[in-house]
Image: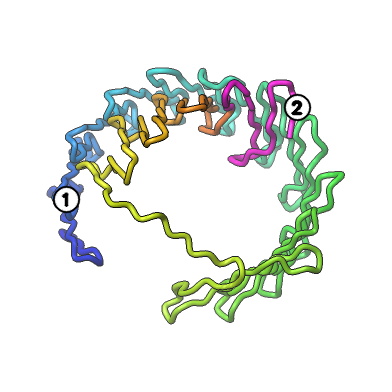
Amino acid sequence: MSTLADPFQGLTSFTYDANGNLLTVQDPLGQTTSHTYDTLNRLATRTDPLTRTESFAYDLAGNLSTMTDRKTQTTTYTYDALSRKTQASYPDSSVTFTYDAGSRLTQVDDTADPHRPIVFTYDPLDRLLTETTSLGTVTYTYDPAGRRTSMTVAGQSPVTYTYDHNARLRTITQAPLNPVDLQYDVANRRTLLTLPNGVSTEYQYDLASRLTALIYRNGLSTVGDLQYSYDAAGNRSSVGGSFARMLVPDAVSTSTYDAGNRQLAFGAQALTYDDNGNRLTQTDPSGTITYTWDARNRLAALSGPGLSASFAYDGLGRRAQKTINGTTTAFRYDGLDAIQETGAGGDTS
């Protein structure tokens, strides 16, 4: 493919080298992104329309060993003899990864994590049994079919899970609350979700198993609904019901962009960015919000009129802690889902 036309007849052009590697991409505005490769056809550099370059290098096993971003920040990666990543070193921090004999990740130690390290244990079937940080331990149990039956967060009652004979999740319970209840039809489609407070959502489908309605109830009383219809190609063509809303932003007279397609102005707002594309400032008549980013391009802090906030992350990239106007909250996770918040006084929710 050398050109691609969009619905507005704008043309995006592509060029390739003799090995089929993508060399350049030129967008409909004539802005070009270029790439170079090493002798093994691995990406070596990428240069954006603002002439900022990222570079990549590899070890003898083909693993990415260094990456220098558009802010000239260099990240170095090391690996063991099995090509497992053992360390990532950033300009402002480092992360160490440890594995057991079964190549299961057993520890992640991030020097930027206020609750380091994260320690994992497993059963003989490679199922996660515990995840521990300085905040405490999350424990898991399973049934003989390998389905999770409980999750326990230190300081809270267990969350238990039950399943029907078709292995579908039926209830999620944490005492003293009522269960979350899920029901299904013969086609294994969810038909009803009931929350502990009695609020429920009914799901309806057409013969093609496309969602046609969501009906929300509080006990026996209907709170509202959403209705969906589709065209012959299966695209959703309309949304109706009492909860349907058309949200259209206020019209603006100006919106400008730079060669990197970054929005510089939007109405009365002015925006600036760093070389990695992270927003640095947002200015409008009420004042300026300033953003700070770490070497991994994660939001580290922001400040503005009446607001001061900072954020810390764990070695898995999850937000470990936030401090808003002097009040600190720490987070504990089940996978990527936050399941507990701990305040400065030790109170949890």
Quarter of the image for the N terminus: give it.
Answer: bottom left
The numbered mark, 1 or 2, whose residue comes first in the sequence reads: 1
Mark 2 surroundings: few (<14), some (14-19) or many (≥20) residues within 10 A: few
**Image x and y of residue 256, in percent:** 24, 45
**Image x and y of residue 208, in percent:** 55, 78
**Image x and y of residue 74, in percent:** 32, 23
106 up-or-down from 251: above or below? above
- In the rendered structure, which segment of residues is drawn in magenta? 321-349
Q: Is residue 187 left or right of residue 87?
A: right
Quadrant of the rendered structure where residue 166 is? bottom right
Q: CA distance from mark 1 to mark 2?
A: 54 Å
Say which mark, if any, is on residue 26: 1
The answer to whether residue 59 is seen in the rendering is no
In terms of secondary structure, what is the magenta stretch mainly? strand
275 up-or-down from 254: above or below? above
* Contact flag, marks 1 and 2 (Cβ < 8 Å): no
Q: Secondary structure at mark 1?
A: strand
To which residue does mark 2 refer? 347
Q: Is residue 230 left or right of residue 169?
A: left
Mark 1 surroundings: few (<14), some (14-19) or many (≥20) residues within 10 A: some
Query: Which residue is at 45% across, 76% downward?
Result: 234
The answer to whether residue 215 is seen in the rendering is yes
